[in-house]
Amino acid sequence: MSRKLIDNARRRLAGETGCQANPWGGRLSVALIYPNTYHQAMSNLGFLSIYHLLNSRSDTLCERFFLPDPDEIAEHRKTGYPLFSLESGRPLQDFDVVAFSISFENDYLHLPLLFELGRVPLFAAERSPNDPLLLCGGVCAFLNPEPLAEIMDLFAIGEGEVILHELLAALIQGGERAEMLRSLARLPGIYVPSRYQVHYHPDGTLAAQTPLVGTPPVVKRQWLADLDSAASRSFIQTEATEFGDMALTEVSRGCSRGCRFCAAGYIYLPLRERSLENLVAQVETGLCQRSKVGLVGAAVSDYPQIAELNQEILNRGGKISVASLRIDALTAAEVAALKASGHRTVALAPEAGSQRMRDLINKNLDVGQILQAVRFLAEGGIPNLKLYFIIGLPTETEADILEMLELVEQIREVWVEEGRKRGRLGNITLSVNPFIPKPFTPFQWAGMEPEKSLNAKLKKIRSGIARLGNTEVFFESLRSAQLQALLSRGDRRLGRLLPELAAGKNLKAGCRSLGLDPDFYTTRERSAAELFPWEVLDSGVSRDYLWLEYQRGLAGQRTPPCQVGCKRCGVCG
Ligand code: SF4
């Protein structure tokens, strides 16, 4: 028994307002785990919405588990006290189902520890029918479940609001484990990896994923057609989280822009938007507990009634916060609303510095639009500017990097010119991240740039920015990007890598110990006809369309955003 761990849990619970877990007794019990800390998890709308959905039913209860903080991990190890739920302090073994909600591939590294502290064997083959059933959801599950295929018993392929009701009904019915998995594999949006046999070619590429009898050849992604039918917001408010000062509210799902590197843009197609009435109702609920509303979505500034929504929030004495703004949708009115909300920094995402690279990724932006957006922000009195860039894109050259530095200089000239008028020079911060090829995007065939040439580009950018006053640059760690690239496009053989990495081995050493080559997964360009591990799923976007978009990108051709009645990618029928 650990006083410290229980006191921490009680403190977290005491700091919360909002949705609560159903009581025990006569219900299916679900342990919902976020494979990172409480601080991170409680700002994840997917996690909070599933928790709310499960506890809104009379036949199910759901309690939360998180990765303990470092000092708590030491306490668990010292006391031998197992992982326990926040609500009732029960261990994992007490639950019928353990459901992971995973948004980031690099959180897979926390799975060996969570299973160890949870006293549940990591690999499905080592578990018995007395162990809880392991379910995995979240965007990682329907981008590429294969690296976790030997760990999880089943995956939810798509949006929980659509998948859970039928799944829960089947789980409540219960039955012998193997038979239950056989029938669950036939439900829409449910992928049961043990119902597929995987074969590889001698060169290590995938030869086939063969379904066992009575199992569908592919699992179709499920999505919620009408967002107004299910709310998605901060169902639990707590200060002890990343966006604890905000009432987070989902505005839309998906994006119509078709940026060719962007998984979120492709894996949540088609674009769906909530009605203004639905949003105003959710905002009113949120403003009962917080004075700021965090608007969540892949392209919030594309929301057709964004000006009206902002005004509705300001009229109720609220403030507005948005993660980043679409450059070509930015208006002076939107800047004024952000200024009125006390925004000190606004982020823009040019993504690529040269026009050639922006056309490659289908950003549909030119320098004029970028500088206009910067001028809007500067004239609107926003003190600081954040800029997102990606480097290492397919066919990128040194000239593209130099053009990026020129663009930053042009942006800085506008920023300084307006700053002088205000008598105050704000800061410009660049966030530069390596390109990571993602499944179900046009760049799923591309290789990640090798570390050596990426480092040379980072060095050039660092020295170029160092010459500019009030401008700084931050780079995502290449190690973490390489791990993400490996896990994003990995296959089942990578499941066994997680304990190696969790035990402290670096990527190369961990792969070597399993006879794997990390470059096979990260930097290798895929052939046009190669079968991908994630193609046991059907995202709705046709492979041919993705290949066509890849070729159009390499040819520098732009593709317009989604249009009503369009059927080109296959998602809209
Ligand atoms: S079919 Fe057309 S409108 Fe629908 S998601 Fe695809 S590109 Fe967009």
Image: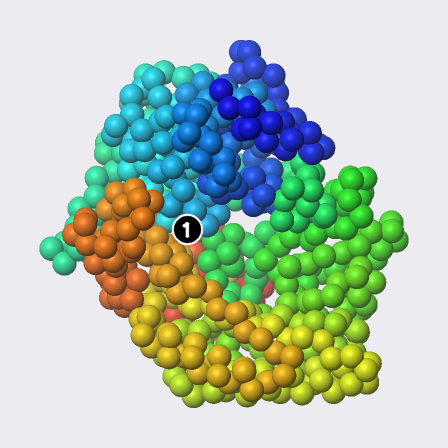
Label 1 Cα crowd, 10 Å radius (few <14 / some 14-19 / many 20+): some
Query: Residue 3 location, x and y as percent?
Result: 55, 24
- What residue is shown with label 1? 106
In the image, farthest residue toward the top: 26
Find residue 229 and report its image quarter: top right
Seen at 63% across and 70% down, the residue is 386
Foreground pick, 545 / 358: 358
Seen at 33% across and 42% down, the residue is 148
Q: Which three-letter amino acid code belongs to the residue tagged 1?
A: Asn
Query: Residue 515 location, x and y as percent?
Result: 16, 52
Seen at 48% across and 62% down, the residue is 262
The answer to whether residue 92 is left or right of residue 525 is right
Query: Residue 193 location, x and y as percent?
Result: 30, 37
Q: Which structural element holds mark 1? A: helix
The answer to whether residue 273 of the structure is visible from this angle is no
Location of residue 512 with respect to 421 vertically, above or below: above
